[in-house]
Image: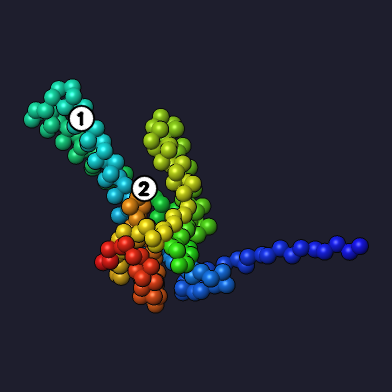
């Protein structure tokens, strides 16, 4: 008795192109090469993250000062000076870390995008993933040898996080930055960016804003 063989449905591999195209899976796919030396969007993200770290640190220092010695001019002045020093250190470290990443990546951050009616996925291309993993692992090792758990944790997260997704129904703000070929898509607890070439910028921007009923458009 002949056995019937079940055919497996194989999803064809996506061959990403720089133009936005609709594929057989019913989704739009494209890729973008972000020039790390000309487009400052990644560096801005780095400084935003460091800025939040600085604000949290400053708040903790103020609380410690207020609880131990009370609120007085000299104590608050010391905390402000210390915060200023930390800001300078983070400014330099952030720039050095960014330049290190840019050099290792060859000056290019390559991103793959997938977009449908529900949202989009921003995913590092395999080459950029490897660079991010190396930098993240290096940061984790530095944190281990320096006995800094925060640095270790940040490095491990950087090494493991290779994609971000956004759901149009949750988006609260959409902003177009045409000169940087960037569309900012912000949710309450997450910020994402879409990079797209000039030829398809208007199509992708219109596609997004028409599917974000709760978003503030800029």
Q: Where is residue 12 in the image (x, y as percent from the top left)?
A: 62, 67
**Direction left: furthest residue:** 73
Q: Which quadrant, please, contains the N terminus?
A: bottom right
User: How far apart, in angstroms, are the residues tagged by discs 1 and 2?
Assistant: 30 Å
Q: Can residue 56 be seen in this view?
A: yes
**Could you tell me which residue is drawn at 29 percent across and 70 percent down?**
179
Specify the color scheme. Answer: rainbow
Badge number at residue 63:
1
Q: Is mark 1 on a helix, strand or loop?
A: helix
Label 1 close to label 2 by CB (< 8 Å):
no
Look at discs 1 and 2 and give the one toward the viewer.
1
Please give the name of the residue rendered at 89% of the width and 64% of the height, measured from the top-left corner: 2
User: Is residue 143 found left or right of 17 in the rendered image?
Assistant: left
Circle 1 packing at 10 Å, graded few (<14), some (14-19), many (20+), is few
Pick out the residue farthest to the top.
68
Q: Quadrant of residue 174?
A: bottom left
């Amino acid at each position: 008795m002949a056995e019937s063989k079940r055919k497996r449905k194989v999803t064809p591999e996506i061959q990403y192109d720089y133009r936005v195209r609709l594929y057989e899976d019913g989704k739009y796919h494209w890729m973008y090469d972000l020039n790390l030396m000309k487009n400052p969007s990644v560096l801005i993200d780095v400084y935003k993250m460091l800025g939040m770290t600085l604000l949290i640190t400053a708040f903790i220092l103020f609380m410690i000062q207020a609880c131990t010695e009370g609120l007085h001019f000299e104590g608050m002045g010391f905390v402000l000076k210390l915060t200023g020093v930390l800001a300078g250190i983070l400014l330099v470290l952030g720039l050095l870390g960014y330049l290190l990443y840019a050099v290792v990546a060859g000056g290019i951050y390559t991103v793959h995008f997938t977009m449908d009616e529900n949202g989009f996925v921003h995913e590092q291309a395999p080459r950029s993933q490897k660079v991010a993993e190396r930098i993240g692992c290096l940061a984790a090792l530095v944190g281990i040898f320096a006995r800094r758990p925060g640095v270790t944790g940040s490095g491990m997260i950087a090494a493991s996080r290779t994609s971000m997704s956004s759901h149009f129904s949750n988006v609260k703000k959409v902003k177009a930055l045409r000169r940087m070929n960037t569309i900012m898509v912000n949710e309450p607890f997450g910020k994402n960016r879409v990079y797209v070439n000039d030829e398809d910028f208007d199509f992708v921007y219109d596609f997004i804003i028409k599917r974000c009923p709760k978003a503030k458009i800029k």
